[in-house]
Image: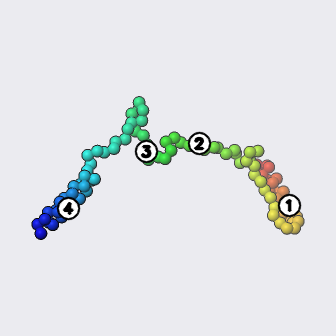
Amino acid sequence: MNNKWAKSLCIVIAVLFLFLQACSTGFVARPESAGDNGEALNLSSPTPLPTYTPTPAPLGSLENPVVLGLIGSQDNQGQKLALDELLNLLHQS
């Protein structure tokens, strides 16, 4: 009977030792400096440098025109006149 208790106690001590060894803080990874200036690397960012964002052409230019259109199954003179009036107002400003 004492032999069983001794084996169980050894197993519990071994498991406890492995658990405590895994939780030890003896060796901690430290961030390295980034070159000669001594600043730390920003490891939380997936891209270390800003990405290029193209600037679109101004609205209404040849590269970015404003397009107007009519959708209708029949010729509607009222729509055409309203569109012409809107275009004239846009050209004036």
Cβ atoms at labels 3 and 1 below 8 Å apart = no
Residue for badge 3: 43
Q: Is residue 9 left or right of residue 23?
A: left
The percent position of residue 78, horizontal first and vertical second, equals 85, 65
Residue for badge 4: 12
Kind of residue at badge 2: Tyr
Which callout, 4 or 2, points at the residue further toward the start of the chain? 4
The percent position of residue 75, horizontal first and vertical second, equals 88, 65
Residue for badge 2: 52
Instruction: Work out whether residue 34 or residue 10 is closer to the camera in this orientation and state it.
Output: 10
Q: Residue at x 64, y 43 (%)?
A: 55
- Tell me the CA gap for discs 1 and 4: 92 Å
In the displayed structure, would residue 76 be above or below residue 36? below
- Of circles 2 and 3, which is in front? 3
- Tell me the CA gap for discs 2 and 1: 44 Å
Residue for badge 1: 81
Cβ atoms at labels 2 and 1 below 8 Å apart = no
